[in-house]
Image (tube, coloured by chain):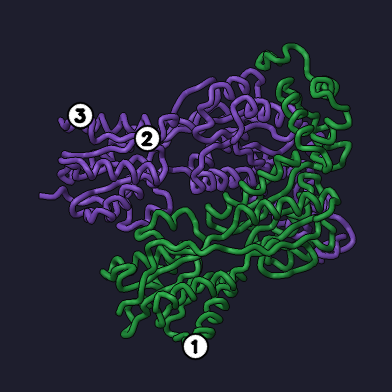
Chain colours: A green, B purple
Amino acid sequence: MNDLFPANQGKKATIDDVAALAKVSIKTVSRVFNAEPNVRPTTRDRVMAAARELDYQPNLSARRLAAKRAFVIGLLYDNPQSDYIIAIQEGALQICRQYGYHILIHPCTEEPAGLVSEAVNLKSQGMVDGFLLSQPISENAALIQALEQRNIPHVRISQRALGGAPCISVNDEEAAARMTQHLIELGHTRIGFVMGHPDHGSSHDRHDGFQRAMAAAGLTVNPDWVEQGLYNFESGYSAGRRLLAAALRPTAIFACNDHMAMGVLTAAHEQGVTVPGQLSVCGFDDTPMARYSWPPLTTSRQPIHQVALLAAEVLLKRIRNEAGGDQSHLLHCELVRRASTGSAPG
Amino acid sequence: MNDLFPANQGKKATIDDVAALAKVSIKTVSRVFNAEPNVRPTTRDRVMAAARELDYQPNLSARRLAAKRAFVIGLLYDNPQSDYIIAIQEGALQICRQYGYHILIHPCTEEPAGLVSEAVNLKSQGMVDGFLLSQPISENAALIQALEQRNIPHVRISQRALGGAPCISVNDEEAAARMTQHLIELGHTRIGFVMGHPDHGSSHDRHDGFQRAMAAAGLTVNPDWVEQGLYNFESGYSAGRRLLAAALRPTAIFACNDHMAMGVLTAAHEQGVTVPGQLSVCGFDDTPMARYSWPPLTTSRQPIHQVALLAAEVLLKRIRNEAGGDQSHLLHCELVRRASTGSAPG
């Protein structure tokens, strides 16, 4: 069965072989493969090179039995945006690989009752060692309570404190205020806002930031220019149509995610409103599509990859009872100026 | 620990409780939870309702030990397009839930040597029962060979036959010919083509379909109007710029995926070329962004969800030694006409 591994024909490499080739102790090889702390990077590299040369793979079944761990984390999510989920998966996997863990995906399309018992059972049946919760499922109180009561390790990606688990947050309020300020600096005073899904904490934070920056500049928020959206293209398109149909219309529209901003752009194109000549449009998130829209979209770059790295790292430290496993983190966005925003029409 | 399940306070529901409440035998409950065939839908529904009412959860650890199965499939992929991967994950999960299986994600960013041994070890260590391979990793000969030689169950999503495993394919050639015909019917004779990544079989199939339809209509393919792309926005943008800079330029450009077509649109917008007035543009895949572009993109809808459903179903039947586990399937695309294609300029 080893015929495809010419470096090691007929015989499976053992931990002793790796230790001998890397000139380290068996204990050190074990430490490297269990991703334990306090191994020097050069030592780690030497062990990994030896393992690769010998095609050594640690015996995970034995490792799982001995450690009473699955070496798998569960990723719970209910966000429909592919780019967001893939970025979270990629970031979390990057850390998991370092620690010798795998990821089991568990999108939550079930009603809350089913969701809670499914998650609890994944843990009790030894399928996973803990959960990484992305937004907005991370704000589901029944789920958080169930995980807390059973001491199931979990880390939340969220702006909202809920329970005692560590939380990886992005300062949406600050970033939305900064974006609003950008529009004001361009001379806009008639600024519309498209809110996101009411169930997402981020939508409220972004709206708060908008209001704060408007107030700080002494500008009035016209309630007719604040539209409720749902974080999708269609709701942005409808909001854009309504805002552009007003007798006195805004000269800038801040849609608080990129999908809705794309909808506003389409509404403007359809009505022959030039962007940014007659109307500035900006979004939020810096999804890949922000670069592909016409004109390319001014937006606020969410550090999603960094959020996922931190969330996975804190979770694995929590599972392994290491320092840092109870640490929350607050990250910041970056304003990305592209061609969809410009000076207010004279 | 059961305090959050008021329906079942203090005592865990057993398979006997479920059988009693559903008025079926224990064997039938077991058949339902193992997703075995030949259970009547009404019986299945009654068992599931009873299980939900009692908050019964089958003991997966015992089930795994008894069956010598992980009840997990591994999803291998190396396609960078989020929408594609998420659609594959969603479709596969839909089937896995029916069968009581979970999905472990394994993006393949490693070099081929590492990839093969990682996959083989996931199986030999009991982490997964088999693999679903999406494009283009499904065309990696070394990986397929290793899986075959070890009898590791796998199903490939691919247009290319490789080894003996079942293959879920989409008729890209036919769909590309149909799209080309659409442009010809609009009166276009000067048609440019942007190829996809040379390592993806789909790119060659789509190019073949384009050439076949041009030949069938008695039209010549101008080699200056065929550009090499990489399936991403940037390569489409560059190709679009080159095509639009030609002394005699095409009146239609068929970019063989949506990302590249969006790049062509941006190149056209930048140069003030109106779409579809002076230039028709079409893509392929019908990603969500095809609806969000300006103008909305004419494209060919890939049945990705259906592909994923079939791939997961065939794989699970293969793992469970059921009929249909060796069945390949060929699916078809649908032309979706939107505003980016129109009559050839007079």
Q: CA distance from mark 3 to mark 2?
A: 17 Å
Residue B174, horizontal then vertical, whole percent? 32, 34
Hey, which quadrant is residue B275 in on the image? bottom left
Hey, which quadrant is residue B277 in on the image? bottom left
Q: Does residue A101 appear anywhere in the picture?
A: yes
Q: CA distance from mark 3 to mark 1?
A: 66 Å
Residue B247, horizontal then vertical, whole percent? 16, 41
Q: Is residue A230 left or right of residue A26?
A: left
Q: Is residue A158 left or right of residue A289?
A: right
Residue under pointer 2: B172
For badge 1, the amino acid type reads: Gly
The dot on residue B150 is none
Instruction: Give above or below for B283 relative to B118.
Output: below
Residue under pointer 1: A218
Mark closer to the chain start, 3 or 2: 2
Q: CA distance from mark 1 to mark 2?
A: 58 Å
Q: Please state the chain letter of the residue tagged with numbered disc 3 in the rendered image.
A: B
Q: Residue at coordinates 66% horizontally, 41% vertically from top-left? A: B104
Residue under pointer 3: B215
For badge 3, the amino acid type reads: Ala
- Residue furthest toward the left? B346
Label 3: few (<14), some (14–19) or many (≥20) C-alpha neighbours in 10 Å: few
Do callouts 3 and 2 point to residues on the same chain?
yes
Label 1: few (<14), some (14–19) or many (≥20) C-alpha neighbours in 10 Å: few
Cβ atoms under marks 3 and 2 closer than 8 Å: no
For badge 2, the amino acid type reads: Asp
Q: Is residue B237 left or right of residue A324?
A: left
Looking at the rendered image, the disc whose residue lies closer to the viewer, 1 or 2, is 1
SS at mark 3 in the image: helix
The front one of A154 and B5 is: A154
